[in-house]
Image: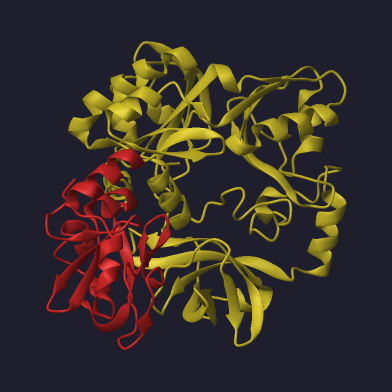
Amino acid sequence: MKKTPLYEKHLGLNAKMIGFGGWLLPVEYTGIIEEHRQVRSAAGLFDVSHMGEVIIRGKDAGAFLQELLTNDLSKAADGKVVYSPMCYENGGVVDDLLVYKFSDDYYLIVTNAANTEKDFEWIREHLTGDTEAVNVSDSWAQIAIQGPSAESILQEAADYPLKDIRFFTFVPEVNVCGVPAMVSRTGYTGEDGFEIYLPREKATVVWDGLLEPGRGMGLVPAGLGARDTLRLEAALPLYGHELSPDITPLEAGLGIFVKLNKDSFIGKEALLRQHDRGLERKLAGFEMTGRGIPRNGYDIMDGDNRIGFVTSGSYSPSLGQNIGLAMADIRYSEPGTEFDVIIRNRPVRARTVELPFYRKKYRK
Amino acid sequence: MKVPEGLYYSKEHEWVRVVDGRAFIGITDYAQESLGEIVFVELPEVGSMLDAGDVLGVVESVKAASDVYAPIAGKVVEVNEALADDPALLNNDPYENWLAVLEITDDSMLEDLMDASGYEAFCAEEE
């Protein structure tokens, strides 16, 4: 199991550590619910150094990414961050990524930890023209600061006016606690916030430099547990749950990140066919009306008919309710539709609701 | 970690308190601490017969569901309904807030369980 450069910091903060995507990471420090609420009301600091980073560069890098990804990068300005699924020919998902555009011939893509090796192989197999891919995951650390107070806390330590970094844009070099770092206004919590990319060996300087002064402004360290409940409330997909080789981005409700009018991209034919034929199933948000917590993999049923399965589920700290996402027969995706979630062999009532469960407070 | 004297303990981190031939069953401080904030409790049906090792109930933290096993055999004569409304009671005081009461069918089963010092040593090994 790999350790991030902040491993010792987590132990010092009495974190409970778990394995995730081949990494030992903090799942919680003082408690998932407490950390979750603190991110919604003030700010949380997350070690997300397990995320992978791959540089794509060369004169044909832009054209290559247009072919590799479902989203359209052609209109992206330098300094823009673009979210995109990356698909197989059959429309299933290899991974979902953030793409940082430095210039027409230099991009950084951010991968899910467990997928980094697989993604890198996939990218190398498909490289075209004058393009090079470099996996820099091992030399980079990543720290996310998320929550309504994130900007003011980070501003104390950063030499760049953060208000000028708009939603889904980045600045390649900002001094954070004296460390040159790349900073983007992005995140995975449904709150305003930033992701900070920095050299691995400087991670502890930035972690301590933000956390200690930030505590007075409500900053707390937050673990994977809170990260998961926060992203679930915001209905942000998690690879391996809402996205997989067996689920297309259209089914996952990510149609706006699939540009079927692009000339060509890997998976286009399959996705166009699915689009034209109409979806048979779709990701639906639901709340439990009966007693029980839905969990990944539980069946959902209407009477004796299996109509899908739960992809993620949890107690929602913000709503005080049990909620979930399910890959459901399209006829059950309309809000207000009722069905059963099978929990330990017993049907428990649930009802489809509008997504997201929790409305984002992004600063644009 | 609290491990009160006078209780019996299982390797699955349940405790048993025997009062007049009845066994109060709960989860230990170690169990609630490793689970984290408990947000859901499922209790057995009153009247059901349980063998040692049968699933007595389920406690769920934010992240996961964990079974609670019957440390000894018996008939469920009472369940702690207060936990259904306020599962966090198990975090606040795991030894006061029992899950169920069993009518003991076989006293000798208690001999298979650990006492406080035995359980403390067991937990130290688990760490």
Is residue A68 or residue A168 the one in the foreground? A68
Assign the C terminus of chain A to one quadrant of the image: top left
Colour of chain A in the rendered structure image: yellow
| Colouring | by chain
Res A42 seen here: no
Q: Where's residue A177, x and y in %?
A: 34, 15
Displayed quadrant of residue B16: bottom left
Query: Which residue is drawn at the image coordinates 47% and 67% (left, top)?
Result: A294
Q: Which residue is drawn at 30% across and 19% down?
A: A209
| Residue A188 x, y percent position in the rendering | 47, 43
Tell me which residue sits at (31%, 70%) in the image.
B72
Taking A335 as reference, is B74 left or right? left
Q: The red chain is which one?
A: B
The residue drawn where x is 53% and y is 76% is A342
Q: In this view, does A358 lie to the left or right of A274?
A: left
Residue A291 quadrant: bottom left
Where is residue A42? Give x, y as percent: 27, 42
Q: Nearer the viewer, residue B42 or B102?
A: B102
Q: Considering depth in this image, is B34 or A121 the residue closer to the camera? A: B34
Residue A256 image offset from top left, x and y in percent? 66, 53
Asked if residue A221 is positioned above or below residue B86 in the image, the reply reads: above
Q: Is residue A119 visible?
A: yes
Q: Quadrant of residue B96?
A: bottom left
User: In this image, A69 relative to B116: left or right?
Assistant: right
Q: How many marks?
A: 0
